Image: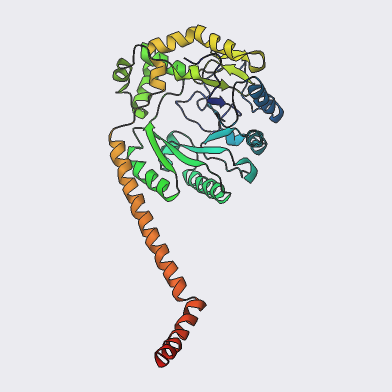
Amino acid sequence: MLDKKNQYDLVYFEIVGYCNARCPWCMTGSKRIDETAFPSTFIKVDHFENAINYLLDNGFICPGKCRIDLYSWGEPMLHPKLNDILRILSRNNIDFGISTNASKVVHLDRDVLTNLRELKFSMSGFSQSSYDRIHGFHFETILNNIEMLVKNIIKEGSPSQFTMAYHIYQFNVDEMRLAAEFCNENSINFEPYCARLADYNFKKSYLDGSISRELLEKMSKDLFLHYIDELIATMPQNYECPQFNILTIDEYCNALTCCILSKDHPEYSLGSLFELSRSEIHDMKLSRKVCVDCTKSGVTYWTHNPLIPKYIDDFKYVTRVKQMSQNRDLELQNRDNTINDILNSKSYKLGRTLTWPIRYMIERFR
């Protein structure tokens, strides 16, 4: 359990509370939740800066020793002043990560990229038919946007890494090889795992058997559900939810109970960040009824342990071998190009021209 005096190593900060994807198994994409209390919006730049200053001044985080991921269930690239948001973090030497569905390309200024540690692409498959079932975007546009973002960031000299979070559904398993090859070609880490229900209420109703037959039938056609009972049965008796060590903040600067509760849940918010201390947040999380129920039911263990099929390791090994082969071919090509450049250089040709006269003079006067 996090000590009350410890700082947070990881903070989730929702800078945009809505998403333009139509994922049916996500509480944001499905638009199932009542947002009367907290209508989804984006955070104002000055409010974000105030929150970062509060976190720094009150010892929640330490520059250079924490990371702020600018997402929870929203799409951060939709923020109209994203560069201004990132500039606040870079100015304070705070590392950050971004997760995006790549539906929109935002040019990230050079001065904001110093502290970008990871740009993650959330993928629902690798074909238009898969995207028609989940995200709802034009697939080729997504690929073009990813290539453009990666090239621009590499060009600016950013130290960040790129990751493809490939959500495995029953209908896109056969598309993984194409996705992995695309990642190899674009310097992107390939991380596939079985897609989950991104909704606490859905997970709870599935586990307690109260979910409707109609919804269960739809889930069984998209998601892998066979492993869940066995997974939860292996949950350690003293399992501690990782959310106790993570601070989650929404676009209203509310400190949240955790990152998986929807805005219409009665225990969604702990209160305004500006009115809470670290110890108060710590104690409030411990006393939340939903946290007890979440752990007891196994929801939290399921949430933080998505299924990664064993064959994925072999599959990723094959793609790594291919990447090594491609790198070797590139090294040989670079070597040959270097040799050709030398052979065709003026200095080399001049040297060859002078070699024989010099050798002749040496032999004559020896």
Q: Give above or below for 336 relative to 215.
A: below
Residue depicted at 28% across the width and 33% down the height: 310
Q: Spot the residue most to the front.
A: 366
Image quadrant where residue 254 sits: top right
Looking at the image, which is closer to me, 5 or 145? Answer: 5
Q: Give above or below for 244 relative to 82.
A: above
Looking at the image, which is closer to me, 338 or 202? Answer: 338
Q: Is residue 230 left or right of residue 144?
A: left
Residue depicted at 61% across the width and 28% down the height: 15
Looking at the image, which is closer to me, 316 or 2? Answer: 2
Q: Is residue 190 left or right of residue 73?
A: left
Residue depicted at 39% across the width and 44% down the height: 179
Tell me residue 181's x, y (percent): 38, 48
Looking at the image, which is closer to me, 9 or 355? Answer: 355
* Residue 57 visible in rendering: yes
Tell me residue 94's x, y (percent): 60, 32
Q: Spot the residue most to the right.
A: 46
What colour-coding does the image apply?
rainbow
Residue depicted at 33% across the width and 46% down the height: 319
